[in-house]
């Protein structure tokens, strides 16, 4: 393995760029697809984005979710085709061209020519493809851009035609009307996007109009409120809310009787009696023009009206009323009646809404539901394309509707039907092109009869699996339950044309479901299905030539119809790939944002249900919105979020991926994006992970530095027999991580994985690596060191494989170095199978399905978990008594009833506990009462309400329970006190620490968590002082190493000099603690007097007042030490020759010299010194490679 840098010098972004180059070099994605050919297919549908805008965090989020799932499926034995898709048609493209060319009206397009307009649209579709590909690739997503699909491709469009043809054959298509925002200036309907792009504050009239109830004995009139007087000539119904209470009231001054919602009575105008008019007399001359600024104001005198009757809205349903105008008298049999719907609210108006079905979406729906108009029949729209009244509205024919408002109000007044008039200022939509006010107007449209298949939609929804489930059960279910027929046609130019050819008289309709059919019927060769390529094509009437020809209807498809057809169209089904589709439908997985519940998810479900009676997908992940840090929508104008490139360049794509996956946004909740959160992932996840990996590499390299055989991981069969408890424990923990990731990924719960990974990394770095430092550094023996290193190696490789779908870059970086010592390893981590999945071979298996993962593994994990609790509790005691870990303590007692656990703590885990806590001895105790006092208290929150007045008596008796009483209660689980039966959940049992006699808190203290009790003996003695001083010295040496910038593999010699007047004290302590210091440092602490004159000092520092001692520490490079008399003897007494030999040996590279001695079995021949005879230099006879070796030998 290659050496690695410190964590602070490791650049995640630059390493990721290197991995991208590596993937390119080996064609990693293409190779993975080739290698998995023949495996079961995993079908993933990628919803197509528009390429006319740049990718943002929402796209990165959805792309990351898709990439994680598809990478995981590839690693678990599937072939996963991933093709990028582009939504090429529709408004976003047309909008760009309209702005570019200054197009204002539909006529502008026709003048320019549909052919030129559509080719302009085609030209910009791929404007940002390069930016998209760069971003998608940079975040680590593997998806095929070369073999992408586009909704404007001929094959895709042909499959869309086939889908529509199937719906038509199934009688699920009809022609009707859809009420849409309409621009009279451009003579075209607008999308909601366009309608919402240009709002202005304008004044508009608001009026109340009376509609006399037919046959009412009091002559009552229903009062409706409207802000669009121009719609009144087209009134066909009045709508109430059947759940509201309505009142019939009489005006005390003019005698008029009105019906309004009780909660809106105050909106009726206030009238005052005129002189000479008796109270309550009818006076038709009263002017109804009581002008108001807004209907929201409350009347000052509700006493104007007396209530005659109250009744429910439901009781009004079906009643007929006198129409305001006669323009629709031909509808009298079915119209001019009261209907009911929940869209009528009590926050404005009178609780009665006038309905003109051609000019309101709810009006149209309600009138259709009540059979005033019928689905699929022609609707009378009394306003033409220019926004002027048609001839049907005789009194206002040819007038622009908005200009006619005043005259219509006057006509209402002249009829004596005007109850109240006013004006109010509100925000109103204007056409973004012509700057004229929009109206809502019914336009002809082709519909898919969704309501016919609603029950099947609801059933199919039950067959799908969603994360989170509430989106499926609530939001999507409710949307399906209220599904309306779907208007799939749009009066536009750039889109897939409707494949409907129709005769002039409307009698003949032919739907094309393939290019072949169109070519056969028309005799024209077809190479492009866009409007300008096929609008001219006619087909002969099936009734004969005398009936003329059929021409295509002008509309194109709603682009949602195209994206809903994606599962079929992207593989050109049914014209190609029939077996692939039919063997793998429904698809396995889709993922998009919450807004798609009413968009893509819905259209997928509708079309698949209509075509095949099945859902389109089996599994779905729905994400929420990514917002700016302040909770607002991300805005380029406001610059309230960091650009994705900036975040990736600072912290890397893996950090961004983990940050968004470990957030509420994957549970369909909003995420307030914080750049610091991405940095937090680097700090809390990647750096600890990297440091564990770096520790492994450094210690593996150290073996070579020390002249031992290079590191090669021991096979797992051998390792799993390791007697070391922490080896067994980390294998169990790794196995649990792998099982957890597998289980959660199979359930598509991506958001649960990161917390578990954090827990695992904490265990790996703060328990396994920390507690095994001596073994990993070779301080025990070489065999044990290699076992520990091999264990860490396999654990890291396994963890990398498990996390590869989540962090594809970082795991690849680690794997590429780790695989260098593993024969037969895969070229990329992304070619590996997921841990625990059956592999096809290879010598480097890193599965963790060992025996240790059974009950034994559970026991070990539980014991280690309790050990960490013990350590935390003991640290708490130390902190309370200001006893730092550097201060050794005499004894600790662990109290717990489980003898198995105590055996583990006093046996396998003992050395780790004692070393970590710096305690000399550990005493297990399973007698829980020896150090504990029991006390019982009633739980007032549980018992208070149940016992009432008896509570005081019960409390007194519970508090008086003896230890024996409490133990008996715990055994039986129930006790009767004052005739009341009390359960374990109703009495709190607390265990307090009971000190031995004559011992105070300063000398002994305890801490517990309700499970285990830890007791520390805090008393000091001389031996503890010496151990504490030794620990302080070691601590200072380690800090000096760090200050000198030394790596773990850098070997140095450490020299100690006492600065005290009386040096004997420190010398005595160090002599007594020599072994513990040597174990901690890996080398002996040397007296400064042994520093040879040729030593290279790397760092030195003086320390004062450390346990009342002062001393200096020097770090030096390993120095050769000579035995002068032995060297002289080599040359038979020639001292000059001996000096020249010393000079020669000092000139040699220390590492090379060491290697030569090892190769020569501690002997080298020196024959290169001019004019001197060759001599054999023997290690530890003539020379020592280090001062430490010399010190140990001579001591």
Image (cartoon, grey):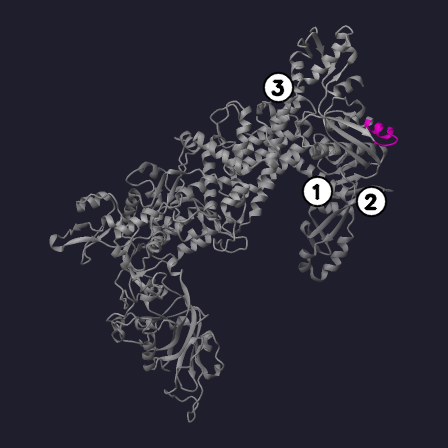
Q: Which residue is mark 2?
A: 1001
**Circle number at residue 490:** none
- Residue in the foreground of this view, choosing between 601 and 1189: 1189
Query: Residue 359, percent across and down?
Result: 33, 66
Q: Which residue is mark 1?
A: 1011
Query: Going from the N terminus, do you reach mark 3 or mark 2 first?
Result: 3
Q: Is residue 930 left or right of residue 494?
A: right
280 w.r.t. 118: above or below: below
In the image, which residues are magenta?
1059-1070
Q: Is residue 954 visible?
A: yes
Q: Residue 1138 sits in which quadrant?
A: top right
| Mark 2 and mark 1: Cα distance apart in space | 22 Å
Who's the residue at 58% across and 35% down the image? 10
- 114 magenta-colored: no
1173 w.r.t. 644: above or below: above
Who's the residue at 58% across and 22% down the image? 712
Q: Secondary structure at mark 1?
A: loop
Q: Secondary structure at mark 2?
A: loop
**Quadrant of the snapshot with the C terminus:** top right
Q: Please state the total of marks drawn on the protein image.
A: 3
Crowding at label 1, few (<14), some or many (≥20) Cα neighbours within 10 Å? few
Query: Residue 691, percent across and down?
Result: 62, 34
Query: Residue 968, percent across and down?
Result: 74, 45
Q: Secondary structure at mark 3?
A: loop
Crowding at label 3, few (<14), some or many (≥20) Cα neighbours within 10 Å? few
Query: Going from the N terminus, do you reach mark 1 or mark 3 first?
Result: 3
């Amino acid at each position: 393995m290659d050496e690695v840098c410190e964590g602070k010098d490791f650049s995640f972004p630059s390493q990721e760029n290197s991995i991208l180059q590596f993937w390119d070099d080996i064609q990693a994605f293409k190779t993975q697809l080739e290698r998995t050919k023949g495996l079961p297919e995993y079908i993933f549908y990628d919803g197509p984005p528009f390429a006319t805008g740049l990718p943002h965090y929402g796209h990165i989020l959805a792309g990351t979710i898709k990439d994680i799932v598809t990478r995981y499926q590839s690693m678990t034995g599937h072939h996963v085709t991933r093709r990028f898709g582009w939504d090429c048609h529709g408004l976003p493209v047309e909008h760009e061209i309209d702005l570019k060319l200054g197009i204002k009206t539909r006529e502008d397009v026709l003048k320019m020519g549909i052919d030129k307009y559509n080719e302009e649209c085609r030209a910009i579709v791929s404007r940002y493809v390069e930016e998209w590909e760069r971003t998608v690739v940079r975040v680590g997503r593997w998806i095929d851009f070369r073999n992408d699909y586009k909704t404007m491709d001929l094959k895709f469009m042909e499959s869309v035609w086939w889908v529509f043809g199937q719906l038509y054959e199934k009688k699920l298509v009809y022609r009707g009307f859809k009420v849409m925002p309409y621009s009279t200036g451009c003579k075209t309907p607008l999308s909601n996007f366009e309608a919402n792009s240009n709002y202005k504050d304008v004044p508009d009239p608001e009026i109340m109009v009376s509609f006399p109830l037919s046959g009412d004995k009091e002559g009552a009139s229903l009062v409706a409120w409207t802000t669009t007087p121009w719609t009144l000539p087209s009134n066909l119904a009045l709508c109430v809310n059947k759940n509201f209470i309505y009142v019939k009231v009489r005006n005390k001054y003019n005698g008029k009787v009105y019906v309004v919602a009780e909660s809106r009575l105050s909106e009726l105008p206030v009238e005052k009696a005129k002189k000479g008019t008796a109270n309550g007399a009818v006076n038709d001359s009263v002017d109804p023009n009581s002008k108001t600024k807004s209907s929201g104001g409350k009347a000052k005198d509700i006493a104007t009206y007396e209530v005659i009757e109250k009744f429910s809205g439901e009781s009004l349903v079906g009643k007929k009323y006198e129409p305001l105008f006669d323009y629709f008298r031909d509808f009298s049999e079915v119209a001019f009646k009261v209907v009911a719907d929940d869209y009528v609210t009590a926050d404005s108006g009178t609780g009665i809404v006038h309905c003109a079905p051609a000019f309101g979406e709810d009006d149209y729906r309600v009138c259709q539901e009540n059979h005033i108009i019928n689905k699929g029949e022609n609707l009378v729209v009394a306003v033409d394309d220019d926004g002027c009244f048609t001839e049907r509205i005789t009194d206002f024919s040819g007038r622009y509707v908005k200009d006619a408002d005043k005259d219509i109000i006057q006509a209402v007044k002249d009829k004596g039907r005007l109850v109240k008039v006013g004006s109010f200022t509100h925000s109103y939509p204007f056409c973004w092109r012509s700057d004229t006010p929009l109206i809502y107007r019914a336009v002809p449209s082709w519909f898919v009869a969704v309501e016919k298949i609603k029950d099947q939609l609801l059933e199919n929804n039950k067959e799908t699996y969603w994360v989170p489930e509430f989106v499926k059960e609530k939001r999507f279910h409710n949307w399906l339950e209220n599904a309306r027929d779907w208007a799939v046609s749009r009066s536009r130019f750039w889109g897939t044309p409707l494949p409907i050819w129709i005769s002039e008289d409307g009698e003949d309709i032919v739907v094309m479901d393939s290019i072949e059919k169109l070519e056969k019927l028309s005799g024209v060769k077809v190479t492009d299905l866009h409007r300008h390529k096929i609008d001219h094509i006619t087909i002969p009437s099936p009734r004969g030539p005398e009936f003329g020809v059929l021409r295509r209807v002008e509309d194109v498809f709603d682009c949602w119809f195209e994206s809903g057809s994606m599962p079929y169209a992207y593989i050109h089904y049914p014209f190609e790939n029939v077996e692939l589709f039919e063997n793998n439908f429904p698809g396995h997985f889709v993922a998009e944002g919450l807004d798609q519940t009413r968009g893509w998810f819905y259209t997928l479900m509708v079309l698949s249900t209509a075509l095949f009676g099945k859902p389109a997908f089996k599994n779905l992940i729905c994400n929420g919105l990514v917002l700016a840090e302040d909770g607002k929508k991300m805005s380029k104008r406001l610059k309230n979020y960091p650009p994705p490139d900036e975040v990736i360049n600072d912290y890397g794509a893996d950090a961004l991926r983990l940050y968004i996956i470990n957030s509420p946004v994957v549970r369909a909740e909003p995420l307030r994006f914080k750049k610091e959160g991405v940095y937090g992932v680097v700090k809390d996840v990647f750096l600890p992970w990297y440091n564990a990996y770096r520790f492994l590499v450094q210690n593996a390299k150290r073996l070579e530095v020390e002249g031992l055989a290079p590191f090669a991981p021991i096979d797992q069969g051998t390792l799993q027999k390791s007697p070391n408890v922490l080896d067994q424990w980390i294998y169990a923990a790794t196995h649990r991580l792998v099982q957890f990731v597998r289980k959660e990924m199979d359930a598509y719960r991506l958001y649960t994985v990161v917390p578990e990974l954090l827990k695992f990394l904490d265990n790996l770095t703060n328990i396994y690596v920390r507690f095994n430092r001596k073994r990993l550094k070779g301080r025990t023996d070489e065999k044990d060191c290699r076992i520990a290193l091999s264990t860490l190696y396999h654990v890291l490789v396994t963890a990398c494989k498990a996390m590869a779908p989540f962090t594809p870059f970082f795991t690849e970086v680690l794997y590429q170095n780790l695989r260098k010592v593993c024969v037969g390893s895969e070229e990329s981590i992304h070619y590996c199978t997921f841990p625990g999945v059956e592999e096809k071979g290879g010598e480097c298996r890193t599965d963790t399905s060992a025996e240790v993962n059974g009950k034994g593994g559970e026991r070990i994990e539980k014991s280690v978990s309790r050990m960490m609790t013990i350590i935390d509790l003991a640290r708490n005691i130390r902190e309370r008594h200001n006893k730092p870990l550097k201060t050794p303590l005499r004894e600790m007692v662990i109290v717990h009833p489980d003898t198995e656990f105590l055996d583990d703590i006093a046996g396998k885990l003992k050395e780790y506990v004692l070393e970590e806590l710096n305690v000399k001895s550990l005493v297990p105790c399973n007698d829980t009462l020896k150090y504990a006092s029991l006390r019982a208290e009633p739980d007032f929150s549980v018992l208070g309400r149940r016992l009432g007045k008896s509570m005081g008596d019960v409390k007194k008796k519970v508090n008086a329970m003896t230890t024996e009483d409490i133990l008996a209660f715990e055994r039986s689980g129930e006790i009767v006190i004052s005739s009341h039966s009390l359960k374990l959940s109703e009495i709190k049992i607390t265990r307090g620490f009971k000190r031995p006699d004559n011992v105070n808190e300063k000398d002994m203290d305890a801490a517990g968590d309700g499970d285990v009790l830890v007791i520390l003996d805090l008393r000091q003695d001389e031996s503890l002082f010496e151990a504490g001083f030794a620990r302080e010295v070691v601590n200072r040496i380690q800090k000096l190493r760090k200050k000198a910038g030394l790596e773990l593999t850098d070997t140095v010699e450490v020299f100690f000099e006492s600065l005290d007047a009386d040096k004997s004290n420190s010398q005595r302590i160090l002599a007594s603690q020599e072994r513990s210091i040597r174990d901690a440092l890996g080398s002996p602490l040397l007296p400064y007097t042994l520093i040879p004159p040729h030593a290279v000092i790397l760092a030195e520092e003086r320390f004062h007042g450390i346990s009342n001692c002062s001393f200096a520490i020097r770090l030096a490079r390993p120095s050769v030490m000579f035995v002068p008399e032995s060297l002289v003897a080599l040359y038979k007494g020639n001292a000059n020759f001996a000096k020249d030999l010393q000079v020669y040996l000092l000139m040699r590279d220390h590492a090379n010299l060491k290697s030569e001695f090892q190769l020569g079995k501690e002997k080298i021949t020196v024959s290169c010194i001019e004019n001197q005879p060759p001599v054999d230099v023997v290690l530890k006879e003539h020379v020592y490679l280090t001062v430490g070796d010399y010190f140990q030998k001579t001591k």
